[in-house]
Image: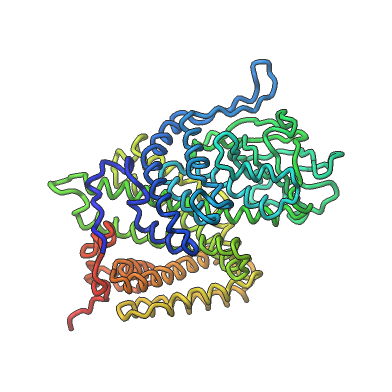
Amino acid sequence: MEEPIDYGALDAGRDCNYWELDRTLQRAAERAYPDESFAWASDRLREFGEVVGTTVVENSEAVEAHGPELHTYDRHGEVQNRVEYHPALEETERIAYSDFGLSHDAFHAPPGADAPMGFVHALTLQTLLSYADPGFVCPASMTVGAALVLDRFADDDRLEEYFQRLTTRDAEDYIEGAMFLTEKQGGSDVGAIETTAVETDEEGVYRLTGEKWFCSNVDAEGTLALARREGAPEGTEGLSLFLVPHTKADGELNDQLYRRLKDKLGTISVPTGEVEFRGAEGYLVGEPERGFRYMTEMLNYERLSNAAASVGVVGRCLLESKVHAANREAFGRTIDQYPLMRRDLVEMSVDYEAAVAFTFAAVRLFDRYHREDDEEAYRLMRLLVPVAKYRTAREAVDAASYACEVLGGNGYVSGFTTERMLRDAQVLPIWEGTSNVLSLDVLRVLAREGAREEFADAVQERLDAVEHESLSDVRDTVAAEFADLRAAFATLAAAAADYAQLQAKELADYVYDVFAAAELLAVAGEEIENGDGRAALVAREFATARFGRRTARGITDGDRRALDAFDALVRHAGVEPTVAEPEVADD
């Protein structure tokens, strides 16, 4: 069993190795990587965790003070659409794409490996990146996402060059991706897009005209945009997908105008702007009028990336809280010795365990679907991904807010990390669909894609795998909630549309809680077989917090686990499996 982590040996949540300090992420990633690929990946993740915890952290602070600047015109008044970046951000890009192959290794075998690492590797790297710079995770994610779309759907040799450059390790040749969806009049209503595309004399080449309102990574060379061809139907069924580069095939600047960069609350490292297409050159991706279908493939990846970024934010805020609590003295003791702070850190730690478990279960399914074209994995993934994005994003905001409180006045001051994490986290519930949009997507998936059966099988499989007697009471509790959830599925399937929509967010929360509890139980069963009861403690705490029916809000229960199991739950100390067994009150 592992020794507890000494957070008091750190001065702050930086100048350290994020991979080595995050044992929760280590175990979840190991479960998610297919076959033997984790044996190769673990060494690289350890190296990356060190670089992110030192160099990238330092770079992120420089970029925060000197964010990208847009120079729309040159001194002669001609459009140049030039974004000026701080050298620190350029170094972070080189580290991510060239040194560690973030986009390359998902599609091509990396040095020393026999096969591509798949999307699980890219998403694990992105989680670690978010410990230092959640904003940069946005272009990194869209680079992988754009490559995914081109790899699956592009049949034009001209687009092959863009795919290769999006996925190269060559520091002189790589480009980044972007996704321009949002228009002022549409927002989440993608079918309201008004951008038009007119075919040129060259087959597959179009001129795009219109306005895109929220364009992150505005100057990317691998930008994917939706537009409507002449005569195409209204709504999403009439949209086609185009690759619209920053520069045209002849090397000239594309015919578009970057009007301004948004003055945002956070995520300073990613330039987000407003773009006018003025007959911009674009290449049709795949078949016409199937653009929305193609873009949903990227959107699923972006939502998972959003969840990975949220996990990274929670992980960093939890680390900052643990380090501060282990070092800050008040009234003669470090504040992590006081019961209320111990309870807070236990609750934050258990919530983090659940967020990581749920997210990486979805990551595993996404990767399996793309590796094996597994339709069962696809249906379950389509249910879990919007739920993961919704819940982890909200938890990132809550964790960052509370981390500010743990640090006291310093937590609200620039330079102490938590203030920036809170500003960066606030966009996570907005990017790639708000909580309401995602909850409605859950209803659609349940109604149209047969995900109810896949979900039921997945939860039952996890419950059936729990055989250790010490977990039987927790398993029974989760099984009872699972039965209630299935009843909720049936009720909303037969309910009027307005009532189903009224309860959509409650249903999404219920899906998260039940599946996360089942996943934590499955992990606990495996860990007990290996002689460690810590994961069982986590599962018990999560199930109690979500499903416990306590009198007097638990005050009269005499529950001291947050005190007695502090080292195990917060500092990752190994414990004997018997410690995880339920306490039996004296008669």
For the view shown, which residue lies furthest in the bottom direction?
587
> Looking at the image, which residue is at 58% across and 76% down?
453
- Quarter of the image for the C terminus: give it: bottom left
Q: Is residue 99 left or right of residue 262?
A: left
> Looking at the image, which residue is at 26% across and 54% down?
5
Q: Is residue 400 above or below residue 518?
A: above
Q: Quadrant of residue 59?
A: top left
Residue 114 or residue 69, whichever sits in front: 114
Q: Is residue 4 left or right of residue 110?
A: left
Q: Quadrant of residue 378?
A: bottom right
In the rendered image, residue 64, in percent from the top left (x then y), is placed at: 44, 33
In the rendered image, residue 83, in percent from the top left (x then y), is placed at: 58, 29
- Quarter of the image for the N terminus: give it: bottom left
How many labels sit on residues? 0
Residue 160 or residue 17, whichever sits in front: 160
In the rendered image, residue 341, in percent from the top left (x then y), is placed at: 25, 54
In the rendered image, residue 530, in percent from the top left (x then y), is placed at: 32, 71
> Looking at the image, which residue is at 51% across and 74% down?
458
Residue 86 or residue 232, whichever sits in front: 86
Q: Quadrant of residue 297?
A: bottom right
Q: Is residue 72 above or below residue 428?
A: above
Q: Is residue 242 above or below residue 457?
A: above
Residue 115 appears in the figure:
yes
Residue 352 appears in the figure:
no
For the view shown, which residue lies furthest in the left direction?
332
Q: Is residue 524 left or right of residue 291?
A: left
Q: How is the image coloured?
A: rainbow
> Looking at the image, which residue is at 30% across and 73% down?
551
